[in-house]
Image: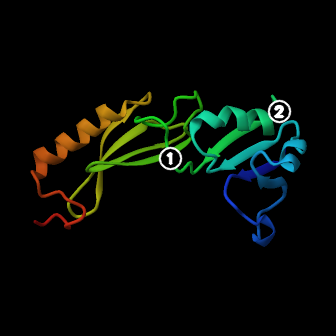
């Protein structure tokens, strides 16, 4: 099937070279974009906004046989990992205190400790999405245990 790219951002798609064989592109919820939905289309929506609008965007721009992907959402409407709307997080990277949370589908969720020299170390893998509180506590506690207060990315590990 073909792919479609939509966004909430003011993008002039005509100026972008090398987008490949897209079936369509445009602004989310524009009349033109809504009328052009096709069966089996792979719809990528860049920065669609808060999760509360994702279902409306999918309803307006996809068909039952479509795949809907949210790409680079600028923010989350919940203080946790991922979303609360039931969408699968295929690729996910979030900065947390003293480290990172990462996932690349179909792999596990991973908690990484960022060391004072800027390298990272995998601390834990999770088969299911952990809570932000659990991952943050694990990474922060391990950082403090190993480095005390000397693990500050803004000061290069030096105080």
Residue name at image x 58 percent, y 33 percent: 88
Q: Is 19 above or below relative to 63?
A: below
Residue name at image x 77 percent, y 72 percent: 15
Residue name at image x 77 percent, y 45 percent: 29
Residue linked to disc 2: 63
Crowd class of label 2 (few under 14; some 14 to 19; many from 20; radius 10 Å): some
Earlier in the chain: of badge 1 and badge 2, it is: 2
Q: Is 107 above or below relative to 74?
A: above
Q: What number is the disc on residue 12?
A: none
Between circles 1 and 2, the one closer to the viewer is 1
Disc 2 element: loop
Q: How many marks?
A: 2
Crowd class of label 1 (few under 14; some 14 to 19; many from 20; radius 10 Å): few
Residue name at image x 12 percent, y 52 percent: 147
Q: Is 16 above or below relative to 55?
A: below
Residue closest to the eye, 123 or 16: 16
Residue 90 position in % (x across, y down): 56, 40
Q: Is 64 above or below relative to 104?
A: above
Horizontal side of 70 relative to 80 (left or right) equals right
Horizontal side of 105 relative to 39 (left or right) equals left
Q: What number is the disc on residue 75?
A: 1
The N terminus appears in which quarter of the rendering?
top right
Disc 1 element: loop
Colouring used for the render: rainbow
Residue closest to the eye, 43 or 119: 43
Horizontal side of 152 relative to 86 (left or right) equals left
Residue 126 position in % (x across, y down): 39, 31
Residue 28 position in % (x across, y down): 74, 48
Horizontal side of 85 relative to 32 (left or right) equals left
Query: Real-space Cα distance between discs 1 and 2?
Result: 26 Å
């Amino acid at each position: 099937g073909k792919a479609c790219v939509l966004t909430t951002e003011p993008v002039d798609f005509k100026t972008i070279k090398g987008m490949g064989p897209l079936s369509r592109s445009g602004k989310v919820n524009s009349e033109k974009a809504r009328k052009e939905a096709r069966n089996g289309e792979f719809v990528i929506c860049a920065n669609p906004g808060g999760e509360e609008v994702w279902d409306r965007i999918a309803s307006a721009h996809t068909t039952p046989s479509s795949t809907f992907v949210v790409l680079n959402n600028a923010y989350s409407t919940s203080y946790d990992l991922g979303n609360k709307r039931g969408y699968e997080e295929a690729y996910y990277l979030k900065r947390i205190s003293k480290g990172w949370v990462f996932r690349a589908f179909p792999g596990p969720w991973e908690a990484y400790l960022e060391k004072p020299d800027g390298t990272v170390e995998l601390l834990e893998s999770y088969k299911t999405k952990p809570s932000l509180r659990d991952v943050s506590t694990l990474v922060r506690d391990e950082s403090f245990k190993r480095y005390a207060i000397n693990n500050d990315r803004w000061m290069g590990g030096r105080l």
